[in-house]
Image: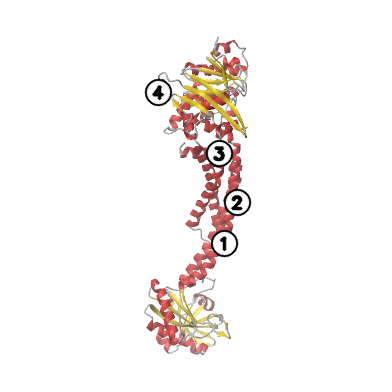
Amino acid sequence: MDRKTNNVPIARVEHLVKIYTLGDVEVPALRGITLSIEQGEFVAVMGASGSGKSTFMNILGCLDLPTRGTYFLEGLDVSTLSRDELARIRNQKIGFVFQNFNLLARTSALENVELPLFYMHNISSRERKERAIEALRIVGLEDRRDHYPSQLSGGQQQRVAIARALVNNPLLILADEPTGNLDTRTSVELMEVFQTLNDRGITIVLVTHEPDIASFAKRTVLFRDGKIMRDSAVQGRRNAGEVLASLPVVEEEGTI
Amino acid sequence: MNLLNVFRVASRSLGRNKMRSFLTILGIIIGVAAVIAMMAIGEGAQHNIQQSIASLGTNVLIVFPGSTSSGGVRMGAGTAATLTLEDADAIAKQCPAILAVTPIVRAGAQVVAGEQNWSTAVWGATPTYFTIRDWPLSSGLYFTDQDNRSQAKVCVIGQTVAQNLFGDANPVGSVIRIRKLPFKVIGVLAPKGQSANGQDLDDIIVAPFLTVQRKILGTTNIGTILASARSSALINEAQNEITELLRVRHRIPSWGDNDFTVRTQTEIANAAESTSRIMTILLASIASVSLIVGGIGIMNIMLVSVTERTREIGIRMAVGARSRDVLYQFLIEATVLSVFGGIIGIILGMITSEVVSQLAGWPVLVSPFSVLLAFLFSMAVGIFFGFYPARKAALLNPIEALRYE
C-alpha cells in the first residue's frame, strides 16, 4: 500500500456532529468540527473533560460514527461504513495508544504487539513475528519481548502499546492521554519515542490536557464544549531528547 | 484471524484458569461418562438378547395354541390344547413358504444317571427340530424319523444336562432314566448359551416326539408347533399361510377370533428387545439431563468470562477484530471446553462400564455409535450453551468495552 501519496489529507472531518441520547435527553458532544490532518503532522488535542475531545478521537479512530457530518480517511468516506468495515479500517490504517496501556495480561510483549496482525489475512506467522520484533526494536524493547506486562514498568508497557500501534504500519496513530499514568521523566521519554516516530513520517494525534506534553507536538487543537476553540502551530516546540538530557538523572526503573 | 490461531488463543485462555476450566467441564465429564456407561449397559443387554434370539434358529415361526375362555374370562395364550399333530402335518404339506415343521411337547422330568440326578425339561420333537433350530451336535447322532415312528427310547441331551449327569465323561451310549423310563443317550448338542430372559438353553433333553407324547406324557395333545420359513423374506407370508390354513382347519368363522397365535422370530425378538431398548433410552435420557446441566455450567462460566474479559474484547476490537472474530473466539472456547470434557467423559464412561461388567457381571458393549453420539452431543452442548455468551461478547461496543473497569 502506498502511503506517500499526493495532496489528499490523511484525515479530514467536515461539520462533525455527535449527539448522545441518554434516555430522553440529547447531549451534544461535538457541535460541528471541521479539521484537516496532513501527512506527517503531530497534533495535540487539548481540552477539559467533557469538551468532546474523546468523542472526536473515537470517531477519528473509527470506533464510533458521527451523528452528522463526514469523515474522510485518506479520501475515503468512512462515516457510512458498517461495523465490520470499520473494524477492517482500524486493523489496517489506525494504531491506538491508550492511557491505561490496555495490554493483554498474561500475554507476552511480543504477542501483544502481534495482536493486530492476527486479524489480518494472508500473513504468515513468520512474517507476523518479524514485524512485531521490528516494532519492538523501534521502541527499544526488543530484548523484553518475552516479558509479560506485569513484568514491565509503566513506561515499558506503554512502549509495547506503541509498538502494537505501529505494527500494522498505520496511516494514523491515535494516542489518548498516553502519559496520563506516567511520571514526568517517563512521560518525556515516551514523547521522545513519539517524536522519533513522527520524524520518520508517521502522523500522530495525541490527546492530552498537559500543556507540557502538548509542547512536544507540532500543532495544538483546543476543544471546548464540542467546538474547536483554537487551532495553532506550537510555538517553541520542545525536543524530548534535549529535555531528557536536562532532567536530573533518576534511578533506573525497577524491572524484573 | 484463521481458525488455528483462534484455537491457540482459546486453549491458552482456558489453560490460564486450569482449575476453573476443570470444574466447568466436570459437569460435561460426568454427563458424558453417565451416557456412555448407561448405553454400554443397555446395548450389552440388547446384544445378548439378539444373540440368544439368533440362537433360536433361522427364520423361525412358533404356533401357540389359543387361550381357553370360560364364561368370558380368557385364560391367556397356551392354556387350551387346540393344536393337533394333523395341524403340524398340514402345515408341512400345504404351506409353500414353510421349509420344515415339527410339533413340540414338553415335560418337566427328574432324570437319573447312575449316582447323579437332575431336574430338566424334556422336549419331544421330530428330527427337523434340529434343522429348524440350527443346532449342531458336539458328539453322537440325532435320532431319526424311524425312531419317532417306533417311539424309540433314545434322546439327545444338552451340555448342561451332560455336565450335571456325566461330568466330563462322554454320555453317548449311556442309559439315563427319565421319569423312571430308560432312555439311551445317542447324541450331545453343541452349547447355545443363555436365552433372552437368562434361561439356560443347554438345560434340555430332546427325544422323539411320539415317545415323549405317548410314553412320558400319555396324551395326544401337542404343545406348540415350530416351523421355519424358506427365507427371511418369506416369514410374513409363512405366517399368513399358517393362519389361513389353521382357521380353515379349525373351522373358525370369518368373525371369530383365532384359537391359536403365530409368532415369528422377529416378533419375539422385538418384544424382548423393546423392553431393553426402553430401559436403555430411559437410562440414557436420565444421564443426558446431567449433560444439559453441564452445558448450563459452561454457559455460566462463559458469561463470567465474557464479563471479566470485557476490556480484552475491547482491545481486540480496537485493533481490528470483527464481531465475528470475537464470536468465534468465545464459541470455540466453549466448544473446546465441552469437547475436552466429552473426551475425558468418554474415557471415564468406558472405564465405568468395564468396572460395572467386572463387578456386577453384566454384559456391556461400548459401541462406536454411542462414543460418536456422546462426542457430537458434548460438542453441540458447547456450541449451544456457548453461543449466548459469545454473542454477548461479539455485540459489545468497543468504546464501552475499552472503558470497562
Residue B300: x and y in percent read 60, 45
Amino acid type assigned to the residue bearing label 3 in the image:
Ala
**SS class, disc 2:** helix
- Does the residue at mark 4 contact the one at mark 1 (Cβ under 8 Å)? no
- Which residue was labeled with disc 1? B282
**SS class, disc 1:** helix
Residue B133 seen: no
Mark 4–mark 2 Cα distance, whole angstroms, equals: 55 Å
- The quadrant where residue A212 appears: top right
- Does the residue at mark 3 contact the one at mark 1 (Cβ under 8 Å)? no
> Sequence-wise, which precedes: disc 2 or disc 3?
2
Mark 4–mark 1 Cα distance, whole angstroms, equals: 67 Å
Residue B275: x and y in percent read 54, 67
- Which residue was labeled with disc 4? A2
Residue A2 seen: yes
Numbered label attached to residue B393: 3
Nearer mark to the viewer, of 4 and 1: 4
| Viewer-proximal residue among B405 and B32 | B405
Quadrant for the N terminus of chain A in the image: top left
Q: Left or right of B298: which side holds B153?
A: left
**SS class, disc 4:** loop
Amino acid type assigned to the residue bearing label 4 in the image:
Asp
- Residue A10's place in the image compared with B240, above or below, is above
Identify the residue shown where x is 43% and y is 20%.
A8
